[in-house]
Amino acid sequence: MERERVDCPDDRWRERLTDAQYRVTRCGATEPPFSGEHCENFRPGTYRCVCCGETLFLSDAKFDSGTGWPSFCRPADQSRVVCERDDTFGPPCVEVRCAECDAHLGHVFRDGPAPTGLRFCINSVALTFEEGDSATLGEDTGTSEAG
Ligand SMILES: [Zn+2]
């Protein structure tokens, strides 16, 4: 099954992304731990792919892994990410990529919290954060009190 992909020549990505974003998402680099802006961010909201804007992770799946990278126990939707075995750098691990534009996001490990037992270890620079409390969206603001 083929999915339509957002395909851009490398030059286009270079123009659109910062150097750090480009190295991580298009070259598979890893940002230094505790360097990313989303590492300590636990506000409610949505994490999107920095390249294509696809919603990848939600704040309710984020947890403090102490590793220095934003960590999630699951993606916003299984179809949004592609997990592929990666043994380029020695010990095999599983690489996480954006299903839409093939951006390298990070890696997934099997030492996460219940119920998934997974830890999606994602580079901050691969994500943009959009703050918003989904729990309060659509709530009726008109309050009425019975006397
Ligand atoms: Zn993407």
Image: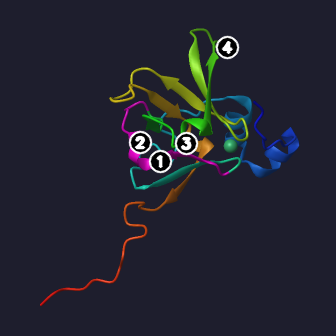
Q: Which residue has dot 1 on it?
A: 58
Residue 58 is covered by the magenta coloring = yes
- Observer-nearest residue: 88 or 95? 95
Disc sitting over residue 88 in the figure: 4
How far from the left and from the top, in percent, is residue 146? 15, 87
- Observer-nearest residue: 139 or 65? 139
Tell which circle, 4 or 2, labels the residue nearer the N-terminal end: 2
Q: Is mark 4 within 8 Å of ligand 1?
A: no
Tell which circle, 4 or 3, labels the residue nearer the N-terminal end: 4
How far from the left and from the top, in percent, is residue 42? 39, 50
Look at the numbered discs 1 and 2 and tell me whether their residues touch, using CB distance below 8 Å.
yes
Q: Which residues are magenta?
A: 53-67
Dot 4 alpha-carbon crowd within 10 angstroms: few under 14, some 14 to 19, many 20 or more: few
- Which type of secondary structure does the marked residue at label 1 adopt? strand
Is the residue 83 above or below the residue 127 in the image? above
Tell which circle, 3 or 1, labels the residue nearer the N-terminal end: 1
Mark-to-mark CA distance, 4 and 3:
22 Å
Q: Residue at x 60, y 24 (%)?
A: 95
Q: Which residue has dot 3 on it?
A: 124
Mark-to-mark CA distance, 4 and 2:
28 Å
Q: Residue at x 34, y 29 (%)?
A: 113
Residue 66 is covered by the magenta coloring = yes
**Mark toward the viewer: 3 or 1:** 1
Disc sitting over residue 89 in the figure: none
Going by the numbered disc 3, the residue's amino acid type is Ser
Going by the numbered disc 2, the residue's amino acid type is Ala
Tell which circle, 4 or 1, labels the residue nearer the N-terminal end: 1
Mark-to-mark CA distance, 3 and 2:
15 Å
